[in-house]
Structures are given as C-alpha cells and as structure tokens.
Amino acid sequence: MSRCTISDVGGPTQISCVPEALDSRGRVYSRVSGTSMLPWILPDDILCIHRAKIGDVSPGDIILFVRDGLPIIHRVVQTRTTAGTTLLITKGDALGHADAPVSRAELLGRVSSILRGHRLINLQCFQQVMMSRVLARVSPASRYWLPLARAAKRLLSPLRRSARRSAADLG
C-alpha cells in the first residue's frame, strides 16, 4: 500500500493523491517545511490533517488547501459568504498579508493536532481553540506589530546571549 503524505508531495501532479487519501483514510500527516506559521507551527512539526468541509471550518482553524498545485497550511482569519458561496480568508501567522480567498474546491482538510518532538498538541481542546480564535483576531494586524516584534528580537538577542555567557562563566 502506498503512503501519501503532504511531505511526500513534490509538485502539482502528486497533490492529487491527497484528496483520495483523505477520503479513504480520513486523515493525512504532513511534516512542516515552511516558516509561514511561526511561531505556532515549527519546521519539522508533524501535522495530522482531517478531511473538512467549508461549513465545518471556523476562524482560528488551521487548514490545508491547494493553490496552483501546491499544498498550503495557513490559519483561517475570517469567513465570507456572498450569494450563497462561502470563502475562507487565510493567513500565515508569520506573514504580513492575507491570502486570496480559499474556495470549497481548494480546501482539503483541517489540522487537528501537531506532533512536536515527543509532545502532542491537540488543537481541538478548549485551550487551543480559544488561543486559535485569539490568533485569528490579531493575525490580520500582524503587518503592524510583527515588524516591531522582529526588531525587538534582534535588539534583545545579543543581550540574551551575553546573559547566557555570564551564567555559564559563573557555573
């Protein structure tokens, strides 16, 4: 039996196996390689993605969709319904702009859990759902606060390194 995961997907021709895997098994696993969802999803995290319909998805959910033949995993920040058609507005947490709206045809599934090392993060538990909803609310404004956070990190990094060296010298 062949194994199809998003991390196996190398191009537009192979993404076609993902909907079939979601239909037959109900889930796929993906090893993260990008950084658009930092700091909430890290490179090498393994995501469990379950089949989802557009009506089952809410702001805060992290979804898998396909665009131009490539898989994308981003957070839903808003839903829009126009003339009976629902579209999802998504955004990578580390990006300063939202994606073009995601249609029902592009949506493949919703991330239900993250495996980080030996730690399983259940995105469907109450705490994670509440955190995801907060992130969906503040994420659209990240184009304002993200550059400030990055600048603060650059400024504070030398101080943290110096403090670590001092602590190591004492120890």
Image (cartoon, helix red, strand yellow):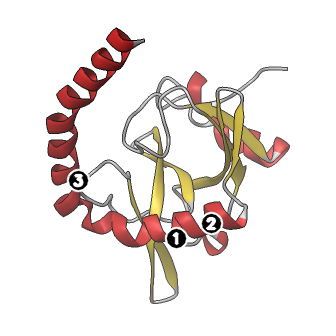
Position of 32 compared to 167: left or right? right
Q: Is residue 114 above or below residue 84?
A: above
Residue positioned 62% across, 60% down in the render? 128
Can you tell which mark lies on residue 129? 2
Residue type, label 2: Val
Q: Is residue 98 left or right of residue 152?
A: right
Residue at screen point 35% across, 68% down: 138
Residue at image position (36%, 42%) is 36
**Secondary structure found at label 2:** helix
Q: CA distance from mark 3 to mark 2?
A: 22 Å
Which numbered disc, 3 or 2, marks the residue that appears first in the sequence? 2
Q: Are marks 1 and 2 in contact (CB under 8 Å)?
A: yes
Q: Residues within 10 Å of mark 3 (few under 14, many from 20)?
A: some
Rate crowding at label 1 as few (under 14), some (14 to 19) or many (20 or more) other CA atoms within 10 Å. some
Residue 146's tag is: 3
- Which residue type does callout 1 highlight? Arg
| Amino acid on which the number 3 mark rests in the picture | Leu
Tell me residue 123's x, y (percent). 66, 55
Quadrant placement of the C terminus: top left
Rendering coords of residue 79 (x, y %)? 47, 76
Q: How many marks?
A: 3
Residue with the mark numbered 1: 133
Q: Name the quarter where the N terminus is drawn.
A: top right
Instruction: Check contact, mark 1 vs mark 3: CB within 8 A.
Output: no
The tag earlier along the polypeptide, 1 or 3, is: 1
- Alpha carbon separation for disc pair 1 and 3: 18 Å
Q: Is residue 122 visible?
A: yes
Residue found 70% across the figure and 67% down from its top: 126
Q: Nearer the viewer, residue 51 or 45?
A: 45
Residue 110 falls in which quadrant of the image? Answer: bottom right
Residue 60 can be seen in this image: no
* Camera-nearest residue between 15 and 170: 170
